[in-house]
Amino acid sequence: MIPAYETSVFINCPFDSEFEPLFDALVFATVCCRFEPRSAIEKLDAGSSRLDRIVRAMFSSKYSIHDLSRCRGEGNDNLARFNMPLELGMAMARAFMASPAHDWLVLIPKSAQYASYISDLAAFDPLVHDGSPSTVVPQVMLWLADRPGAVVPFTPSQVLKALPEYQTEVNTLRREWVTGMRWSDRLSLAIKHSRRLAASQP
């Protein structure tokens, strides 16, 4: 089943092992806010490029979240990864189309000198995090809670308290699949733990 446009949130972020805890936190926080996460990895299609999958998922989502954590020099050649800014640019262009509407959020690490390499972002207010779920989750939830018609039943503190149990199950399933895990399983676990959190409330 294709998620509804009005509640879909495309997540643009690194997929490396170092970022996995933050990716899990982004997915779980989005589900706990009653939105539906979308991603370039939601469908493994060898017959299409990743850019095709990104465009399809992003353009069928009303919202998108873009983390620029990897825009820094890495490796022996000190090269930065600019896939995330490329996708952010696509989302910004999408927002200028008349219909349907698209809204986006930028997350940056505390030490990022984003104004030096994407000076046009200086006109906006990216939200800052320190690379931990404890700072990412409140920022994302604050933004999602302010979207039109949003109903957010939990506080960031409640979501952060439930997050480790969700991550434990995700990590177990990730190991069982060896090379990764199905997107549908990731979402099912997020929904299960979100419902468990709701049931625990007085």
Image (tube, grey):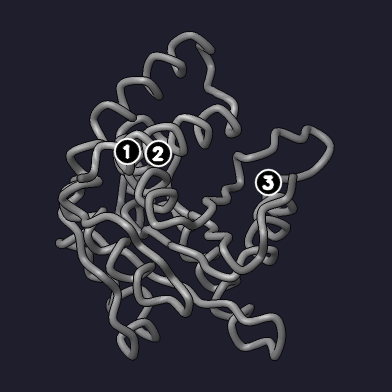
88 shown above or below 109:
below
Q: Secondary structure at mark 3?
A: helix
Q: Is residue 103 left or right of residue 112?
A: right
Figure quadrant of the N terminus:
top right
Q: Position of residue 152 (x, y in %)?
A: 35, 62
Q: Position of residue 169 (x, y in %)?
A: 37, 20
Q: Going 63% across and 40% down the picture, which residue do you hit?
A: 42
Q: Is residue 173 left or right of residue 68?
A: right
- Graded by Cα atoms within 10 Å as few (under 14), some (14 to 19) or many (20 or more), the crowding at tag 1 reads few
Q: Residue furthest front?
A: 202
Figure quadrant of the C terminus:
top left
Q: Going 59% across and 26% down the picture, which residue do you hit?
A: 182
Q: Amino acid at mark 2?
A: Arg
Which quadrant of the figure has residue 97?
A: bottom right
Q: Amino acid at mark 3?
A: Arg
Q: Is residue 98 visible?
A: yes
Which residue was labeled with disc 3? Answer: 50
